[in-house]
Image (cartoon, rainbow, N blue to C red):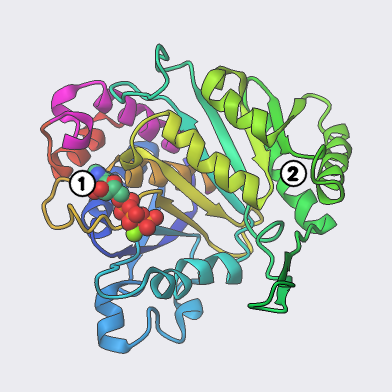
Amino acid sequence: MSKKQYRIAVIPGDGIGKEVMPEGLRVLEAAAKKHGVALHFDHFDFSSWDYYEKHGQMMPDDWKEKIGKHDAIYFGAVGWPAKIPDHVSLWGSLIKFRREFDQYVNLRPVRLMPGVPSPLAGRKPGDIDFWVVRENTEGEYSSVGGRMFPDTDREFVTQQTVMTRTGVDRILKFAFELAQSRPKKHLTSATKSNGISITMPYWDERVEAMAKKYPGVKWDKYHIDILTANFVLHPDWFDVVVGSNLFGDILSDLGPACTGTIGIAPSGNINPEGDFPSVFEPVHGSAPDIAGQGIANPIGAIWSGAMMLEHLGEKEAGKSIVEAIERTLAERTLRTKDLGGNADTTACGKAVAEMVD
Ligand code: ATP
Ligand code: MG
């Protein structure tokens, strides 16, 4: 039993974020009780359209003081495009967290769950179970570049990829550590060094250097084009897949898409050293089309809670939630409408909470 009490900042945000988060908290409380983990939740109403309407900004000026000392941030969804453009809501909240809290890892599981139809024919639960690790702070998404001679025939546009040794090494270290902690101990690196002739060979070089520090981890690399094909053709080949910001972005959407609905996919934006809080949130958005109806699938939020517990070091409690999700999804009557069931958000959340052991 852990003696430490974890302080969690809870931010439900907009739309179905407000509906799925209570279920996530219900399940976290059940797992905490069963496993003797002490969780303390502080609730915040900012990072939402309601807050913006009242205050003219997404978050208070002292947002960093309010949540910067918490052990983690548990987040619902942000965005209400009918009222506020997505770039304002996103850049005013989640992107600020990512940058100011140096969340340089984006982590998503790719795991086929029972009761969830995969677009890949013939795959069964257990066949697909891996992680995508995306570099979240540099690489192709730098703002270095520019446009010359606009609106002329000589128009000339560039944008540079920026890779730093610190930036590349720290994401690779995270990925190798993760691979080492898993039974298969296998890491795959996404590259394109046959076409991108300066930055990608550097990435490959750093992978090779890092691999020497993890002799127990088997590793390989694929060019991004064939790697995406193999996600679809041979998802069983993978265990931990690491990619630069752009390649990781593509893989971290493709992977979960191969294993079913957006309603169940979780994610973490992580600062592994724990110098700053990490954010755990479902992949889905605020889903204005179904908000307020009580039918949203809460599994994405619940699974994100499990990832949060694992990040905090409470592995058993986290695992108990993932297993409870699997047992719940196996029963049609406990699944929400998007998965062909007839349970509402609360019924599904309660079912998972009861299954936790
Ligand atoms: P983003 O926030 O990335 O802009 P989006 O707003 O385009 O995403 P979502 O809000 O994720 O998209 O919704 C996409 C579709 O998936 C919508 O039709 C929505 O109803 C459905 N959906 C999303 N999340 C869930 C969920 N938890 N349960 C059921 N359906 C969902
Ligand atoms: Mg949206």
Along the horizontal axis of the image, is 3 left or right of 213? Answer: left
Question: Does the residue tagged 1 have its C-beta within 8 Å of any atom of ligand 1?
Answer: yes
Residue, disc 1? 296
Tag 1: Cα neighbours inside 10 Å, few (<14), some, or many (≥20)? many
Residue nearest the observer in this picture, 331 or 6: 331
Where's residue 169, x and y in %? Answer: 79, 49
The three-letter amino acid code for the residue at tag 1 is Ala
Q: CA distance from mark 2 to mark 1?
A: 35 Å
Comes first in the chain, label 2 or label 1 = 2
Where's residue 357, x and y in %? Answer: 32, 29
Magenta residues, as a range? 312-341
The reply to whether residue 297 is in sight is no
Residue nearest the observer in this picture, 264 or 223: 223
Q: Inspect the magenta stretch and tell me whether residue 337 lies in it.
A: yes
Where's residue 114, x and y in %? Answer: 32, 21
The three-letter amino acid code for the residue at tag 2 is Leu
Residue, disc 2? 172
Disc ID at residue 61:
none
Asked which secondary structure carries label 1, the reply is loop
Q: Inspect the magenta stretch and tell me whether residue 313 lies in it.
A: yes
User: Which residue appears at 86% of the width and 46% of the height?
Assistant: 197
Whether 57 is drawn above or below 131: the answer is below
User: Farthest residue toward the top?
Assistant: 122
Quarter residue 6 falls in? bottom left
User: Which residue appears at 41% of the width and 75% of the height?
Assistant: 88
Asked which secondary structure carries label 2, the reply is helix
Tag 2: Cα neighbours inside 10 Å, few (<14), some, or many (≥20)? many
Marks 2/1 in contact by CB < 8 Å: the verdict is no
User: Which residue appears at 50% of the width and 79% of the height?
Assistant: 65
Whether 206 is drawn above or below 289: the answer is above
